[in-house]
Structures are given as structure tokens and as C-alpha cells.
Image: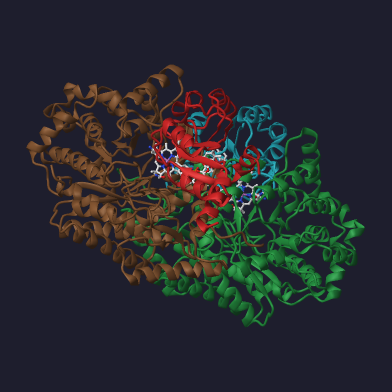
Chain colours: A cyan, B red, C green, D brown
Amino acid sequence: MCYKNAYKIWRDSLKTIVIGVIGADVHAVGNKIIEYTLTKSGYNVVNIGVLSSQEDFINAAIETNADMIMVSSLYGHGEIDCRGMRDKCIESGIEDILLYVGGNIVVGKQDFSEVKERFLEMGFNRIYPPGTSIDQALKDIKQDLGE
Amino acid sequence: MCYKNAYKIWRDSLKTIVIGVIGADVHAVGNKIIEYTLTKSGYNVVNIGVLSSQEDFINAAIETNADMIMVSSLYGHGEIDCRGMRDKCIESGIEDILLYVGGNIVVGKQDFSEVKERFLEMGFNRIYPPGTSIDQALKDIKQDLGE
Amino acid sequence: MKLANKKLTEKEFLEQRQEVLKAWPTGNDEDLDLDKALAFLKSVPEDKNFALVLNKAKENDDTLIQPRGGVPVLKEHIKLLNYLADSGADLLPSTIDSYTRHNRYQEAQKGLEESELKNRALLNGFPAVNHGVKGCKEVFIKVSKPLEARHGTPDARLLSEIIHASGWTSNEGGGISYNIPYAKSVPLEVSIKHWQYVDRLVGYYEERGVKINREPFGPLTGTLVPPSISNAVMIIEALLAAEQGVKNITVGYGMGGNLIQDVAAVHSLYDQTLYYLDKFGYKDMEISTVFHQWMGGFPSDEAEAMALISYSSSVAALSKATKLITKSPHESVGIPTMEANGLGVKASKFIVNMLKDQTISESKDLDLEMNQIKKEVECLIETVLKVGEGDLAIGTVRAFEQGLIDIPFAPSKFNAGKVFPARDNEGRIRILDFGNLAMNDEIKKFHLNKIEERAKTEGREVSFQLTVDDIYSVSKGKLIGRPLRDL
Amino acid sequence: MKLANKKLTEKEFLEQRQEVLKAWPTGNDEDLDLDKALAFLKSVPEDKNFALVLNKAKENDDTLIQPRGGVPVLKEHIKLLNYLADSGADLLPSTIDSYTRHNRYQEAQKGLEESELKNRALLNGFPAVNHGVKGCKEVFIKVSKPLEARHGTPDARLLSEIIHASGWTSNEGGGISYNIPYAKSVPLEVSIKHWQYVDRLVGYYEERGVKINREPFGPLTGTLVPPSISNAVMIIEALLAAEQGVKNITVGYGMGGNLIQDVAAVHSLYDQTLYYLDKFGYKDMEISTVFHQWMGGFPSDEAEAMALISYSSSVAALSKATKLITKSPHESVGIPTMEANGLGVKASKFIVNMLKDQTISESKDLDLEMNQIKKEVECLIETVLKVGEGDLAIGTVRAFEQGLIDIPFAPSKFNAGKVFPARDNEGRIRILDFGNLAMNDEIKKFHLNKIEERAKTEGREVSFQLTVDDIYSVSKGKLIGRPLRDL
Ligand code: B12
Ligand code: B12
């Protein structure tokens, strides 16, 4: 078994997470840190970067046979940008994919339980309030994807 | 008419205000500023200083035939220190003297309308909330003592 | 048209203008007739003219206060601005929403309508293009302070037409500073051209006797940007603007966190902007400086946020910046309420007043830091001119292409993204990985020594982990992201 | 017994002690037996020993955070202290009420009982004597940080006995600093003697291996006190304490408002305290410094108050003081709620952490200001020794009698009250009227020049009006009380 193959096998054994920043949002710092942290934690990270549409996320997930899509939205338009995303996943045949969303997902300081309700209805599996760093979400990811 | 007499006549024409800081209170700065401001505004000021008892105020008022007693209380014990002061005035025969109180007259940030009520009941004529500088009270003084 | 750092002729400008105004129906407004707009701008009273108010402040050594702020619905936006003025703002903003910034007026319209309907903001700013001259003029008329559009728009031509015709006398941005940190796939060449247009518009008014202020966006990504990189960008944008006829420019800087480095950065930014403008023959320029309160991740605790706002204000005042852009205690969470925004203004105003008559004493340390920044800026600017074969605009595009200028953490694919900063032992921002950044060996050695010194203090290797720790540190209440030590 | 700066013999001390303990029934507590108290103090863990925690902070160049705070009811007081610790306080206070400070235990008792009854604080602090060792020990046991009594008591002998026997390992005050600003008619001779006793008590424990910290109260009247005056008082009290066997001393300074003057004051305070202790032969002293956030009138707006708190913290951190005493956003109104007090702590802690690795660069300006303060302090101390014919205690009494030392705005009739300060053009506190203050002509000329310069800038005469304007100015958001200027 040559070195390249061993690498591939190891690589394939990793769970794959698509990350990116949705909509017209350009906040790039958190995105880079998320890539760094998830990779260090042993995930196969597919980073589609900022200014990504729902389609960009879904296409990447299909192409890489991903286990989870992790949407970042920092700039406040998350509510508009995320609507209908689960439906698009269903249409695309990845109805069961895990959908996470976090960052500063709505405009302003809103009652988070209400915000969560809105995003649960949209079909997101986990929704994080402002100030939740990626490190704090690692536990959930492990749980949802299995050790 | 010699110079000294003229001075005395002028002096006697001024309204007299007894000022001081009541109780175990040593806040001296406001007291000095009040003396300076009232004097500049044309009043005859009798300053009994800090750490003054109700008796000190009343005795000074009687001695100088004062028109007003202006009690400062900064340190928070004003409520305890001022109780019964009007009664003592009545006992001493200066029942009609104007009683002002100001500074930071109770402990902590309290609803001022309640505080005012308490001091009105004690027989004070005017009660000032924290942050009212002596300049802001000049209008009331003028009104109560006549121009 | 080929890119070049050359003033657009009036003909070129007017031709392009016809296209620009077609981008959205509000471009059709008759008040966008240049003569009408000029007449309206001439009627703007002195105390509502951004440029004049800045000039006066500079003369008096004042540091003026300007918050950020913008909400979608017109009435609410006016209410917000008046509240901010009452809280002590000397200059007013209108922060533009992100759809508008990307010229997605359709989506902005949707967000605006939904916000009006639901009585809750769904946009992160004021969609000025959708409101058109009509709405923007109403804002101008109903507030009592000078107005500026603050955004992050690679192509702000229509936006700029609309706001200036509405009496707004300042516009933030630039071909680099409103592209590289704010876009992913807009070529630099394109954004520079678009900002030449925006500057030319200001030049057009300027030639006809109306002063309008322009403000390149200093903080860039707001994240550990070494002062020499942002200062170099500021100077390039000032030169590009001056070529188009802009006269009143405010160059900007986002707080790094170390007092001496920050003061040194503001001082040298001012000195070198003057120097280069003069060197390239731009006369009668009016230059002022703007200091941005901490632009990176904020602490979520509101008392801590207020402390950070106040500390930022102290540094601004001590640096004698002409203007200070404030943050709010809600920063880490979301667009602030009117009240929270006002708290930031009040605290900031208090501090600049308290420190009005104070400066940082001259010292060897300050001098050295200023010299360091100046040397680095010189390296960058000289390189840009060299690769541009004398043309600043072309040089800029090429320098970015080759990573000779490189802005840390920028989303743009036209930025190399190979530079990584980290703090030194005093919390000054240094460069850990230079990528291809056009700096000489002496400079590189200086930076690496400083960072090694720090790593050594912390008993660890120099690595990207330093950068990551430093990105988080301020929001966690430390300037330097040191590993936790035993107490 | 005649006043002299001489260590009380153990016999003298123990004799006096018998009287002291009789002043109030709680003096009867068997835990006040010195051997028992000593045993208890020896059981205090290191991280709850004030002196040791300070020593460690000094070593690490940390600035520790300590709020003020005290409420009458025991349970509430403990709750308050734990809340403050959770907010980030490194060291805990117990601010004592004003009746106790004047030894009016009867009234304190009334206030305490009424507070318990009405569920509302009627006293402005914690009546430690009335609570006795029993209550004070409960406080000590139920909190996790070192404890200090903070008060303003000319005769704090019984209070000190009670708190130390309860495991509180620091005590604020001194024969001058807790008399002149805090009393009207207590002769200085008397308060110095009483504080010799307090210091001797600490010396007693110190000789037996228990470290206790003592902290002269630096801010004095908190109102425009020129640094040299407060520094001189600090040094005198440090020397008096050292003579009685105190080893661990924290000298204090209240912020004046000008960054450079404040940093200069803290640095020279430390230097000169060391110098004089050494000069008079006190060895093995452990000296630290404490910086008090702005001690004069506060702005009533809470955002402004938070800004002032944060600015004060920046200065403290840059001065590298070992400890910082914080204020709250309620300062101008009244004793703060627990929550408001916590906000002050959080903001302050954030700032000292942010500025941990920064200092003010050495500069000519800083040097000159330090030299100025040192020269003035020297004048004062030399004069005290001279009029005391070599005895510091006697000299102090005589110097105050003759106004050679004179504290602005103090209520005491044993203070001349002829010195009036005012700010110069940079906001540094200078002396407008020297009264009889023991300073030489060169110094006087320096101050008057500075003040004339300012008056000239403002187009007015040098007069007491400057002082009055400066007293109000910070609460109105300006450092210097300049007449309003047209904008
Ligand atoms: C730096 C910054 C910028 C920089 C960005 C540079 C760049 N290209 O990256 C600049 C200055 C350019 C900028 C621009 C704007 N910004 Co901005 N910006 C910030 C700021 C100060 C810090 C962001 C940051 O980098 N933090 C550090 C990183 C490490 O943290 P992070 O981004 O939060 O990401 C972490 C977590 O959120 C989490 N996370 C993120 N996604 C996800 C997803 C999941 C599933 C999970 C579990 C976790 C998670 O993990 C990340 C790593 O730990 C924040 C406020 C703050 N946080 O203090 C505002 C903020 C995000 N910006 C905001 C806004 C509105 C804007 C602008 C519209 C301008 C304006 N009005 O001021 C533009 C928008 C441009 C655009 N089109 O997107 C708002 C958003 C408001 C809202 N949601 O209500 C904020 C919150 C500020 C505010 N309070 O107003 N900004
Ligand atoms: C300086 C100061 C001190 C100095 C005083 C030096 C001295 N001897 O004068 C020192 C440090 C010694 C001190 C000590 C204490 N202080 Co003190 N002090 C202050 C402070 C910061 C400023 C006071 C001042 O000089 N202001 C400037 C002058 C010009 O203003 P002024 O005093 O308010 O007076 C003006 C007005 O109030 C008004 N006014 C006053 N009286 C009257 C009367 C009338 C009728 C009218 C119309 C107007 C009026 O006119 C004056 C001139 O314009 C205030 C808080 C603040 N205001 O910011 C606390 C404050 C007054 N102190 C307070 C306390 C509790 C104390 C102490 C018990 C210690 C402690 N727990 O911290 C001791 C008490 C000592 C004692 N026995 O009295 C509290 C009182 C709390 C309350 N009422 O709930 C305050 C409010 C601080 C706080 N929020 O905790 N203090």
C-alpha cells in the first residue's frame, strides 16, 4: 500500500463538513477559524468561503458526500438568506443532511428563543446564539456525527 | 455716616441663610462652594460647616435671625439625621423658618418621589435630588425669600 | 477604457454617468440633474457641511464623534440619527445595508418592504438607493448635523450620486478598502475604476465650489491589520482620489490595541499622507484623520464593551485624530438599539472631552515606532509605483496580484491572503508570515525578532496558533492571546 | 504619654489595649484574646492573606482590582462581597459606616437595627464594631478573597482589633489621612497616637509571623489634591507605620486626571517611599502602590461614569500600580447597588487586563514631572523634620498647625485650609494659592507660571473662580474648567 493510498483511506474515514458564509455576507475571519478548528479536530472540511448561496452549499455537500452543512451568517440577513434551505436540500436528494447555523444570525439583539423557533421551523437542526464560538459547538458536532 | 455703618446697614439688608452639613458627615467641598455661590448671589451666609447637629443649625439660625436653614447631607444618613428637625425648630420658636435639604440625602439610588415624601413629612420645605447643584436651586431661593 | 491613475475627463465622466443612473429606477430622479444637485449642495449650511465641520475641528484640535448606524425604514432611520445627535454625535452616519453594497437592489427592496410590514429590521442598514434622492433628502433635511454614507460597496457609483444630490457631504470608501475586505470576486481593477468615478463626482462638485469630504476606510478587515499595510492603502487611495479632484480627505486607522503603536500609526499616517500628496503635486489638500474604535471581535459583556469603547476613545483623543468612529455595548451581538448606540456615543464624547488638552509626550519609543511604520509604508508605496511602472492604479492591481500588498483575513480572491500577523510582547501588531509582502529583510528581521521574543516568553513555538489566539484575545478581555498562566 | 515617633513598648501597647476594648461591648469577645487571635490569623490561607496576595501581584506586574462596598446587614454584606468577587474583584473591601467612623456605636446600632427591620440600608456602610468578631469572622469565612476594612476613622483602635482578630489582613487609614479629610475637631496629635496604636497592633502580629497589610489613604479629600501634598502625607504615614513594626505597606494616590502627571505621581510615590524608608533605617519593607479611580464629583450619566471608570483604569494600568480601587456608575447618586458596583469592577478588570503588558514610554515630559513632584515632596518632608526637631510625629503636628502642610478642602480645623489648587493648560493640578505651604520660591514660580498660562489662554484673571470651575468640571465632562467657548 503506497503512501498516497493510506492517506486517501484515512481521509475518507473522516466525516465531512461543508462550511461557508451565506448571502451577501463577507465576514471571513470566523470562517477561517472554523476551518482551522474543525480540521484540527479531525474533520474533513470543505470551505466554500464567504458570499455563498444556498446552492453553493448544497452543491458542495453533494459533490463531497458531506455529513453536515454548517452555515455561518454574521451580518444580520441570515433570516432572509436561510429561508427555504431545507426544502432545497430535499429537492436535491440530501434531505437528511445535518444543517447547523450560527454567528450573528439575525439583525440586532433579539430574544433568542424566538429566533431559534424561526430557524427550527426552517428546518435547521442546530441554531447557535451570538458569541458561541466554534469550540463550544464541538461537543454537539461530535454527538451528532458520532465519535 | 461712617464707612463701617454703611457696611452694617447693607449687611443687615441681606437675607440670611444658615448652611452646614448635618450629622457625622464630613463632605466639605460642596459646603464651601455653597458658601461661595450664595455669598456671590447677595446673601448673608452663616456657615456652620460639616459635622453639625440639628441644634447647631437651630442655634445659629436664632443667633443670626436667619430666614432659611439649608441642610446639606451627602453621606447617606440624611434620613436619620434630619428626623425631628422641624419639631426642634418649633420648640425653639422659629417654627416658620424655611428648611431646605439637598445633596445625596439617602443611602443609594432610591425612587426620589418616595424620598421626597419622607422629607416633606418631616417638615422640610424643599428637598433636592442628587446632582442638583446650588446654582440650580438659586431660583427657588429667590422665589421663597423674595428678590 | 484602460486603467490608469488619470483624471477622468468631464466627457468620460458624463458618458459613464448616463449608464450609472440606469442601474435602478431611482437613478431617474430629476434631482439627479447635476445643476439641480449643485444648487442644492450650495444651499447646505456650513454647519451641515462635513468638510467644513472637519476643517474647523482640526483647527481647534477637537476630536469629533461619529457613530455607525442605519436602519431600513426611513422614519426609523431619521429617529435614530436624531437620537444619536442628542446623545452627542457631532457627525452623523447612514450605514448602508449589505444587499445595496453588492448592488442587489431587488433583495434590498424585499428586505425594506418586509421590515416595514413586520415592524422589525430585516436589513442591516439603510438602503439608500432604494430610498432614492427623495428619501435621502428627507433624512438630510430632518437632521441637524453633517451626513456621511458609510458602507463597503465595490461599485458605489449610483449610491454616491444619490447621496450627494441629497446634501450628504461625505462618502466613505475607496477602490481597495471597499473591495478587498468587502467582496470575494470583484477584480481590483474594476473597483478602482468605479471609485475613480465616485471621486470624480466629488471633484466635479469641488471644481464648482462645493466642498465634499471623502474618507478611505482605514480598518480594512478590522482584524490585526499591521499599521503599515493599512496606512499604505490609505495613502494610495488618497492619491487616487486627489487625482480625480477630491480636496478634502480623511484618512483612517483602526485601533490595534497598543497605545504607543496606535498613536504612532495615526501620526505617521497623517505625516506620510501629506508627504506623498505633496510629492505628487496635489496642492491645497485638506487632510484630517479618523480613528476607529476597536474593530475586531468585541467582548459580549456590556460593561466590558463600554470599557473597550472608553479605552479606544482615550487612544483616539491622545492621538489627536480629527474624528472618532464609535461602537456600542451591543457590538458582539448585533446591530445596536438606538439606546445602546447612544451609550457608546456618550462614553466616547466624555472621554474626548476629558482628554482634550492632553497628548502623548514625545519619547524615543514613540519615535522609533513611527519610524518603523514610515519605513514600511515607504517600502510598500515604492514597490507599487515600481511594479506600476510609475502608474499608481496599475501598480496597485499588480501589487495585489503578486501579494506585494496583502491584507490579512480578507475575503477577496484578488488578495493573496498569505500575510499572518501576531502581537509582540507589548501587544504591538507585527507580522509573523510575510507571504510575498514587499518589505525588506531588515524589516522582516525586526518583526520576526519581536514575535520570537513573545513566543519565548510564553514558552512556545512561533506558529499560526499565535494568530488564532490573538484574534480571540480582546473579546476575552486580554490584548495578547497568551496561553493561560497559573496564578 | 507624650507624642513621639517611637515604637510603643509592648507594655504600653497592652495597657492601652485594656482601655480600647472597653469602648463597646463587642470588645469583650474572648476571640480578642491576643493568643487566640494570633492562632486564628495564622490559619488564614495564603490566598486570603492581603499582604501575600499583593506581594505576588507586584512580582507579576499585575494590577489587582478592589471595589469599595459595605452594607449594614450581615447577610446582605456577605452577599455583596461574593457578588463583587464573582464580578472579578481580586481583593475585597468592607466599607465601614460613618457613625462607626466617629465611634458613635449607639447610633450605628440604631441604624443597623432599623435597616434589618425595614429591609433597606439606613447606614452607609458595614458597622463592624457592632457586628463584633462574631460577625466579622463570619464575613471572613464566607468569602474567598482577602479582606480589608476601609473607613475614615480617626480613632480606629477597637475597629482594628476586631477586624484583625477576625482574619481581615488589611486595614486602610492613617493618623493624618483618616483625620484631616474625615473629621472636624480631632486634634492631629490624638489621631496620630491612635494610629500608632493601630500600627503597633499590626507590628505585634508581624513580630509573631503574621503578615498584615496597611494602606494609608492617598486621595485625602479627593478634590484637586496636588500630588506632592498627598505623596508627602503617604510617606509620613509609611514612616510612622514602619516605626511601629508594620512591614507591608501600600501607599496610595487618587487620580488627578492628567495622564502624565498621574503616572509621574505613582512612580515618584513608590520611589520616594522606598527612599525615605531606607534612609530612616526601616529594612525588609514590602511596598506596593494603590491607584484610586477619580475621587472627585462624578458625572451623573451612567455611560459617562463608566467612561470615567474605564479611563481611570487605563491610567492605573499604565502607571503599574499594584492595586486599583474602583468606583461604580452610581457614584454621583449614592451607595451603588450590588449590580452597579459589579459593573465598575468588570469594566476596570477588563482594562487592566487589556493594558497588562503596556507601560507609558519614558519621556522628558514624564521625567520632568516626576522630578517636580519629588522636589516638592522633599521640601515638605524636610520641613516637617525641621519643625519637629527631628521627630516626624511632632513635626507633622507642627507643620499642620502652621499650614506648612495643608490639604485643600479638608474639613478639619487642624488644617490651615489656605491652599487652593487649579489646573494648568494640560489639566495638571498646580497650586494657585500656596497659603503657608512649605515650598521654595522656585516651585512657587513654576506653579504660578503654569496657572497664569492657563488663565491667559482663557482670557481671564487668575482667581479662585478657576478652582471652583475645576471642582465641577469632571462631573460636567471636562477635565479643565474652562469658560464655555463658542463653537
Ligand atoms: C470584523 C468585523 C467586520 C469586518 C469583517 C472583515 C472580514 N471581511 O472578515 C468588516 C469591518 C469588514 C465588517 C463589515 C461589516 N459588518 Co461586521 N463585524 C465585525 C466584528 C467586529 C467581528 C467579527 C469577527 O471577525 N469576529 C472574530 C471571529 C473569530 O468571530 P465570529 O466572526 O463571531 O465567528 C465565530 C463565531 O461566530 C462562531 N460561528 C460563526 N459561524 C458559526 C456557525 C456555527 C454553526 C457555529 C456553531 C458557530 C459559528 O465561530 C466563529 C469562530 O469561533 C463583528 C462584531 C463582533 N463579533 O464583535 C461585526 C458584525 C458581525 N458586523 C456587522 C455588520 C452589520 C457589518 C456591516 C454590515 C457593516 C456595519 N453595519 O457595520 C458590514 C457587512 C459587510 C458584509 N457585506 O458582510 C454586525 C452584524 C449585525 C447583526 N447580525 O445584527 C456585527 C455583529 C457588528 C454589530 N453589532 O453591528 N465587519
Ligand atoms: C469627594 C467625596 C468624598 C471625600 C470628601 C472629602 C471632604 N471632606 O469633603 C472623601 C473621600 C473623604 C469622602 C468620604 C466619604 N464618602 Co464621599 N463622596 C465624594 C464625592 C466623590 C464627591 C463629593 C463632592 O465633593 N462633590 C463636589 C461638590 C461641589 O458637589 P456636592 O458635594 O454634591 O455638593 C453640591 C450639591 O450636592 C448641592 N448641594 C449640597 N447640599 C445641598 C443642599 C441644598 C439645599 C441644595 C439645594 C443643594 C445642595 O450643591 C453643592 C454645590 O453645587 C461623592 C460622589 C459624587 N458626587 O460624585 C461621594 C459621596 C457623597 N460619598 C459617599 C460616601 C458614602 C462616603 C463615605 C461614607 C465613604 C464611602 N462609603 O465611600 C465617606 C463618608 C465620610 C463622612 N463621614 O462623611 C456617598 C454617599 C452615598 C449616599 N448618599 O448614598 C457618595 C455619593 C459616593 C457614593 N455614591 O457612594 N467622600
What residue is drawn where x is 61% and y is 48%?
Answer: A48
Task: Name the residue furthest front.
Answer: B1
Spot occupied by residue A84 in the image (x, y as percentages of width and height): 72, 34
Q: Compared with residue D158, is residue C100 higher up or lower down, i.e. above or below?
A: below
- Camera-side residue: D288 or B15? B15
Spot occupied by residue A126 in the image (x, y as percentages of width and height): 58, 31
Q: Is residue A85 left or right of residue C142?
A: left
Q: Which quadrant of the rendered structure holds the C terminus of chain A? A: top left
- Camera-side residue: D302 or C474? D302
Q: Compared with residue C268, is residue D339 higher up or lower down, i.e. above or below?
A: above
Q: In this view, does C359 lie to the left or right of C275?
A: left
- Camera-side residue: D457 or D36? D457
Whether residue D429 is visible here, answered yes or no, is yes
Number of residue marks: 0
Spot occupied by residue B132 in the image (x, y as percentages of width and height): 57, 41
Spot occupied by residue D50 in the image (x, y as percentages of width and height): 26, 40
- Camera-side residue: D58 or D301? D301
Q: Is residue A90 left or right of residue D146?
A: right
Task: Name the residue furthest right.
Answer: C30
The picture quadrant where one finds residue D392 is bottom left
Q: Compared with residue C61, is residue D302 higher up or lower down, i.e. above or below?
A: above
What residue is drawn where x is 61% and y is 67%?
Answer: C60
The picture quadrant where one finds residue D90 is top left
Whether residue C435 is visible here, answered yes or no, is no
